[in-house]
Image (spheres, rainbow, N blue to C red):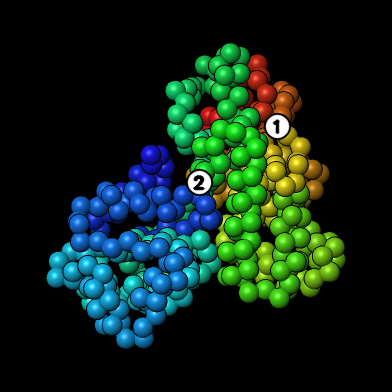
Amino acid sequence: MIYPRAIYTDIEKHLDTPEAVIITGMRRTGKTTLLTLIRDRIKTENRLFLDLENPLNRKYFEEEDYEKIKATLEFLGLSFRKRSCILLDEIQHVRTLPSVIKYFIDHYKVKFFVTGSASYYLKNLFTESLAGRKAIFELFPLTFREFLVFKKSSFKIPKNEAAVTKPIFNAIDRLYEEYMRYGGFPEIVLKEDTKEKAKAIEDVFTSFFQLEVLQLGDFRRNDVIRDLMLLLMQSTGSKLDIQRISRDLKVSRPALYDYMAFLEGTYFIKTIRPFSKGRSTEVRKMPKVYICDTGLANHFARLDEGHIFENSIFQNLRVKGELNYYQRKSGVEIDFILNHKDAYEVKINPRASDLRRMKELSDELGLKSCRMISRKFSELEGVTYGFML
């Protein structure tokens, strides 16, 4: 069974448009399943689906003469005399593919749907070769609402915080607890046994390290990037002290920045920058780091509930747009500012003073709205919950 992803609604608008559809995201987030769904939904039978993790399929696109590639595709059953569609999975394995895709769009009006797990590669190359002829979508681990669909839950999340009674909170919170503990990778969500879930989380990490770090990264010190990944998981929700990390790992800061850029470009981490209004009392330079999925962070770093909850909120907000954080030198802060206008503060058990302070700071910054997100059930007016995002 193929479970729907929220992003498909946006992709569906591009099924019949001429531009190439590029789906990028971390390994094991469901890109292949989504590509299969697209294959089954497009209207033409004149289509070809190829998995480029298979070395034999890669060879079809390694010809310098693109007309020879055309002849091969025709041998595989594709006709260029009518509307044709090519679906390619994991295209980061063939570095010349952007120019191949451009050629077939320009000369034969082929519709492409492609997936890949390295955004730094896909975005840069496709920006150069397909300006104005591409639509890029990012697929992340499941949000909690998607998680409920995969769990076949009949719960209807209340739209109004006032409608969340203690019994309703407790019923939904049992599932949110699972979501926080094991994360949102689809294959892990679908497993019932906790030992199988734990093993699958380790498989996701191993797969990422072997297929992204070792194959794509081409780093001289793979042990350093492994230790960096573990350190970053332990630092979830914290500001990055590059000088300290450089010293602890005994690696130069330029090399460390390269490692960080790679891990962010392959979706393992996300750094968020400070929101600034230009005041000298703001903390400006140090980004915060979050892990792509709470299941990985929880399994490998054994973080406390507060950090895991904060990472789960990040996981549900990142699909909505750009994130920043705000902090004064005095320590007063807002955990997340979404799209420069909406504030979100994350607390295990907020107090009235927390609400008042957040409201004052949000007003001072000229933000449109502010929401306090509580891990525990709260009687305070104006408090919302992670499962309502």
Q: Give the amino acid at mark 2.
A: Val
From the viewer's perspective, tell me whether residue 73 is left or right of residue 55: left
Compared with 280, 335 (above or below) is above
Numbered label tally: 2
Please provide percent x and percent y for residue 109.
Answer: 22, 69
Distance between the alpha carbons at the discs numbered 1 and 2: 21 Å
On the image, which quarter does residue 352 sit in? top right
Q: Nearer the viewer, residue 336 or 199?
A: 199
Q: Is residue 163 left or right of residue 350?
A: left
Which residue is found at the position 18% from the left and 64% from the top?
83
Tell me if I can see residue 355 in this picture.
no
Looking at the picture, tell me which residue is in the foreground, 38 or 15.
38
Q: According to the image, label 1 marks what residue? A: 347
Q: Residue furthest bottom?
A: 65
Query: Is the residue marked by circle 1 packed among few (<14), some (14-19), or many (20+) residues within 10 Å?
Result: some
| SS class, disc 2 | helix
- Image spot of residue 209 (x, y percent): 64, 61
Kindly tell me whether residue 161 is visible in this rendering. Answer: yes
**Badge 1 or badge 2: first in the primary sequence:** 2
Name the residue: 75% across, 41% down. Answer: 303
Residue 14 vs 249, above or below: the answer is above
Please tell me whether mark 1 sits on a helix, a strand or a loop. Answer: strand
Residue placed at 58% from the left, 43% from the top? 315
Is residue 236 found left or right of 188 in the rendered image?
Answer: right
The residue carrying mark 2 is 319
Q: Position of residue 175 (x, y in %)?
A: 57, 27
Q: Amino acid at mark 1?
A: Lys
Asked whether the residues under the numbered discs 1 and 2 touch, taking CB atoms below 8 Å apart as contact, a structural biologist would say no
Between 43 and 139, the residue placed more toward the observer is 43
Disc 2 crowd, CA 10 A, few/some/many (<14, 14-19, 20+): some
* Quadrant holding the N terminus: top left
